[in-house]
Image (cartoon, rainbow, N blue to C red):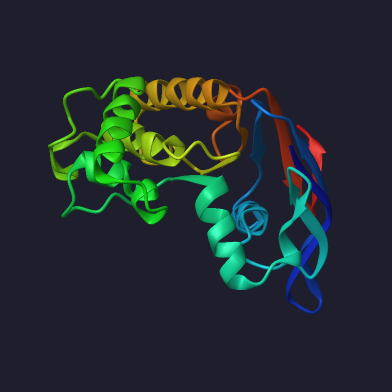
């Protein structure tokens, strides 16, 4: 489903951050990428999502080459096809949990009643039934991250990207969140890529790769 070929990115002419990245991720497969701080893990996610343009190489999802589209078309493509899970949750404090979770649907023009129905189902799927009307500030860290997973999957994206999704959680909450993420990815049949410093988090994935010296290697 996801194909990355020869991806390269430089921020300084003499220092390539990513040299030649090749990556294939199948539907319902969860791949973890580990590496030292500064190795380019987050940059790789941004390139795969079309948030940044590579200097060389291309990214394809379902055969569509991301770099062949203009910025507006790419933003719409990302809105429809990509779900993000971030370390810092990024829930909006002035919206209810349900409105946060259903935000991707609102951006796609889905009607309010359908948004509410799908938000309730998404919250139930991650063990947060009954939290729809609450504010994010009333949730624990683990609950916030599960809500963020519900938001990332509610529009049924083809690609799920997670950037250090357990970085702000204790061990017990991290385990619960990883179980939710894995179940959601499998249920949706999405291709998923997670970058993490945590070997415990990485061990939950179907496959683990290491990013070092600008290339991906088997971990």
Q: Is residue 175 above or below residue 104?
A: above
- Determine if residue 19 is in view: no
In the picture, the quarter occupied by the N terminus is top right
Return the x and y of residue 107 as percentages of the image width and height: 38, 55
> For residue 133, what is the image quadrant?
top left
Residue 7 appears at what percent x and percent y?
A: 81, 58
Residue located farthest toward the bottom when viewing the structure as drawn? 13
Q: Quadrant of the C terminus?
A: top right
Residue 89 horizontal side relative to residue 204, left or right? left
Q: Residue at x 61, y 63 (%)?
A: 74
Q: Nearer the viewer, residue 2 or 111?
A: 111
Q: Is residue 136 left or right of residue 49?
A: left
In-image side of 211 versus 145 (left or right): right
Instruction: Give the camera-side residue of 149 and 116.
Output: 116
Q: Position of residue 213 (x, y in %)?
A: 79, 54
Please determine whether, in this image, residue 176 is positioned above or below residue 45: above
Identify whether 213 is placed above or below 187. below
| Residue 112 visible in this rendered orientation of the protein | yes
Q: Position of residue 123 (x, y in %)?
A: 30, 28
Q: How many marks?
A: 0
Residue displayed at 81% across by 77% down: 14
Q: Quadrant of residue 143?
A: top left
Q: Nearer the viewer, residue 193 or 186?
A: 186
Task: Name the side, left or right, on which 42 lies relative to 25.
Answer: left
At x 35% / y 28%, what residue is drawn? 122
């Amino acid at each position: 489903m996801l194909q990355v070929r020869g991806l390269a990115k430089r921020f300084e002419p003499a220092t390539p951050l990513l040299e030649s990245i090749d990556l294939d991720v199948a539907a319902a497969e969860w791949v973890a990428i580990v590496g030292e701080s500064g190795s380019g893990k987050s940059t790789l996610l941004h390139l795969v999502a079309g948030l940044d343009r590579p200097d060389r190489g291309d990214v394809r999802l379902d055969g569509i080459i991301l770099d062949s589209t203009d910025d507006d078309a790419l933003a719409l493509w990302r809105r429809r096809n990509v779900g993000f899970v971030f370390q810092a949750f990024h829930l909006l404090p002035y919206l209810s949990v349900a409105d946060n979770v259903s935000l991707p649907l609102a951006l796609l023009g889905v009607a309010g009643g359908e948004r509410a129905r799908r938000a309730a189902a998404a919250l139930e799927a991650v063990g947060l039934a009954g939290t729809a009307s609450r504010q994010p500030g009333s949730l624990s860290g683990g609950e916030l991250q599960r809500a963020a997973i519900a938001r990332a999957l509610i529009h049924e994206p083809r690609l799920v990207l997670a950037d250090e999704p357990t970085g702000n959680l204790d061990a017990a909450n991290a385990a619960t969140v990883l179980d939710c993420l894995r179940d959601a990815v499998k249920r949706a049949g999405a291709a998923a890529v997670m970058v993490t410093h945590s070997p415990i988090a990485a061990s939950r994935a179907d496959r683990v790769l290491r990013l070092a010296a600008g290339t991906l290697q088997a971990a």
